[in-house]
Amino acid sequence: MASVTVVKSDSEHSNIQRRQVEYAPRPSLRTWLIGRPLATADAPHQTIGKAVGLAVFAADALSSVAYGPQEMMLILAAAGAMALGNAFPLSLAILVLLVILTLSYEQTIHAYPSGGGAYIVARDNLGELPAQTAGAALLTDYILTVSVSISSGVAQLVSAFPELYPWRVGIAVALVGAIMLINLRGVKESGITFAIPTYGFLVLMFLTVGVGLLRFVMGGLGQVAQPPHYEFPEVLHPITLLLVLRAFSNGTTALTGVEAISNGITAFREPRSRNAGLTLVAMAAILGSLLVSITFLAVRIGAVPAEAETVISQLARTVFSGRGLLYLAVMGATTLILVMAANTAFADFPRLSALIAADGFLPRQLAYRGSRLVYSRGIGLLALLASLLIIIFRASVTALIPLYAIGVFLSFTLSQAGMARRWHKIGRLKPGVEIQELGSTLRFEPGWKWKMAVNGFGAVCTAVVMMIFAITKFSAGAWIILLVVPLLVLMFTGIHRHYQHLARSLSLDHYGPPPPVRRHRVIVPISGVHGGSLTALDYARSLSADVTAVHVSIDPAETERVQAKWERWGDGVRLVILESPYRLLLEPLLGYIEYVAAARQPAEVITIVVPQFVPAHWWTNLLHTQTAVLLRLALLFRRGIVVTDVPYQIA
């Protein structure tokens, strides 16, 4: 039960009171699944440090080393086994791009300590349309992050246990549901849950590449034993610039999680910017070293990019000489990190959708925090959309990859271009002058030219990669994202126009009090004469003396009984009987209401008072016609008509 305590009035003679409500939610299945509700005051205690932050926001980027090299080698394989050696220099090029992005987002984190990433940067510096484009691109990419990561994790599992292959789609959807439940428990709890597996994966991967490099230096690494079957094309493609660019674009999927930390700064403990920045640098160092090392070793052992067995599986059993305990540990940890990579999207998608919703471009419900101080509706929406993609594409990483990364590189480009524009604005300020924008404060900084150059160069690099991805992957499925992002922007615009129209309609700027109600007509639909209908009749008579009861006649015998009872219990209130030869209930009633409404005067209100049974058990509501609900839906857009129901509790 809730108890209410009067705390104080706003002033001595004010008619406004503040009341403290103390409510202890009852234990339920919901609280058992996601934990007890948290008070708003608990929000500062739900923040996380650098160690947990790395597990929450870097899992996506770190896990991409499990599929990035394989997808890069898969494209090179079109030119034959000898072409796979080009994967290593391509990984070095990706490493350079990673360094550029890290420097750029390090600046973004300190410039926008409240988070928001590309969306906020583009909104404040490039305008509404670029901001909505960045938001649509990132939301799309987060959905794909969950789909690709979970599907890749299941692929690792299937590599170790091939008999699970027919069940891969069901396993993937179940894993999405499990991660959703963990995230509904809150950022702090989900971070702690995922921290141990994340660091376990890092230890095992560094052990794998460390042992592999040591064996390579000592000359004892050798080649992968019994590699999976892969059909190299009979007519080999030449190693053209287009082929290399396609392989490079596939490999850049390893960078898709770099922006995650800049979007989730508010989840970190104070000092937020410093903790988030250090986490970003640590993530980039780990990601770069693993990406280059795994690619180098995969080329040296002659790994084959086949769906039947992943490159990581081939590397692990080569380094550890078979499918022993260490191999199984590596595969288990890789599966877990790929599954947990989806957690990055579950941490950022709800935050970004809440920011966009707060600006009025998505439904406002997405901006509300749930009982565990997380954006529950955003988490549920992400799980639903990602599961649909997994089902449609049969949990195939190769089929999902062409859709991946275009959105995030578009957001990279807009973010860096927005930051370059920000530094340009800062350079035009005089020392000591401050300008407050929605997401940050502008003040003169001496090194603005160098910072603008870093972000500008980053924007050019990511724009080039985005174009490469769009061109090389267009026919393979990238056209879907190039179509979806503009459609999402149009949807954002439509939602925003609705909220703007609503705000204008509700504005008090030109508000005038409505004309007083001169006449109040009340209509009471009744199915029979009983305690419920008479209770509704009493309520109706308290509203107005002009009350009309209406009965729709389907059965003449029943109508006679209603009429006889009404003469005894109706207390002089007129009863209108509507003959319904086709046994319709709602349509004749609506027709009568329309008839009455047609003669309504300007200062007249028509109220439909509907008796409603309230049975002792909720499920027995299914046994009763929900007349009040149906009438509300039918009359929702009619002016001057009010529908209310009068509950009649049945013990």
Image (tube, grey):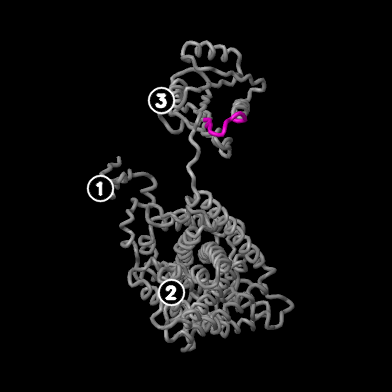
Task: Name the side, left or right, on which 49 lies relative to 381.
Answer: left
Under circle 1, the secondary element is loop
In the picture of the structure, the residue carrying the numbered disc 1 is 12
Mark 2 and mark 1 lie on one chain; the one further toward the N terminus is: 1
Q: In which quadrant of the rendered image does the C terminus lie?
A: top left
Mark 3 and mark 2 lie on one chain; the one further toward the N terminus is: 2
The one nearer the camera, 322 or 75, is: 75
Kindly check if marks 1 and 3 are in contact, taking CB atoms under 8 A apart as contact. no
- Type of residue at label 3? Ile
Foreground mark, 1 or 3, reads: 1
Q: CA distance from mark 3 to mark 2?
A: 63 Å
Under circle 3, the secondary element is loop
Mark 1 and mark 3 lie on one chain; the one further toward the N terminus is: 1
- Type of residue at label 2? Ile
Taking the spot 52% from the left edge, 27% from the top edge, the residue there is 521
The stretch in magenta equals: 597-606
Does the image show residue 313? no
User: Which image quadrant for residue 133?
Assistant: bottom right
Taking the spot 54% from the left edge, 55% from the top edge, the residue there is 500
Q: Which mark is residue 435?
A: 2
Taking the spot 67% from the left edge, 68% from the top edge, the residue there is 476
Foreground mark, 2 or 1, reads: 1
Q: In which quadrant of the rendered image does the N terminus lie?
A: top left
Taking the spot 61% from the left edge, 14% from the top edge, the residue there is 556
Tell me where residue 315 appears, x and y as whole percent. 51, 76
Q: Is residue 545 above or below residue 192?
A: above
Tell me where residue 455 appears, x and y as whole percent. 51, 81
In the picture of the structure, the residue carrying the numbered disc 3 is 650
Q: CA distance from mark 1 to mark 3?
A: 45 Å
Q: Is residue 397 magenta?
A: no
Under circle 2, the secondary element is strand
